[in-house]
Amino acid sequence: MELPKDLDIYFSGPADRPFAVIGIYKDVPFDPNIWQPISIDAENIGKWRHMIENYNDMLDKPYFGYDIIDPTGKVVGKWLSYQRSTVVKMTKGNKITVYTPDGSFARGDDPQRIGE
């Protein structure tokens, strides 16, 4: 399965079982400082993708997908994680920052929760 061409993909946590994977639309100003870019051919991410595609419904902590919405209500990306919510904020430089499920984030103004 190919990654979407209109999204930049990042992950947080170990590559073989990420806490979260996000896709941010390429035209969205995004600050990836706390996210690692994903490599489609990385062995651990490949194993993880196979597990999600084939066995997600059998996992103790299955992954859920949500839209990432900016403070104005525009869909700016996708969220995939076994955590059902996170915080999204707009930085003073007008870039989107998405908190990682482990609580890592760049502190700033007006966070918004997504998910539950």
Image (cartoon, rainbow, N blue to C red):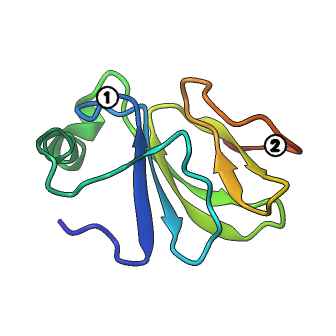
Q: Which residue is mark 2?
A: 111
Q: Which residue is mark 1?
A: 14
Q: Quadrant of residue 68?
A: bottom right
**Quadrant of the drawing holding the N terminus:** bottom left
Where residue 105 sits in the image (x, y, percent)?
A: 66, 34
How far is mark 1 from mark 2, CA to CA?
25 Å
Residue at the image position 67 percent from the left and 49 percent from the top? 97
The three-letter amino acid code for the residue at tag 1 is Pro
Where residue 114 sits in the image (x, y, percent)?
A: 68, 46
Query: Dot 1, crowdedness within 10 Å: few (<14), some or many (≥20)?
Result: few
Among the two numbered marks 1 and 2 on one chain, the one whose residue lies closer to the N terminus: 1
**Quadrant of the drawing holding the C terminus:** top right
Vertical position of residue 84 compared to residue 95: above or below: above
Please say whether residue 116 is visible from this viewpoint.
no
Left or right of 79, for residue 111: right
Left or right of 107, for residue 3: left
Q: Quadrant of residue 2?
A: bottom left
The three-letter amino acid code for the residue at tag 2 is Pro
Secondary structure beneath disc 2? loop
Where residue 24 sits in the image (x, y, percent)?
A: 52, 63
Vertical position of residue 30 compared to residue 54: above or below: below
Left or right of 63, for residue 86: right
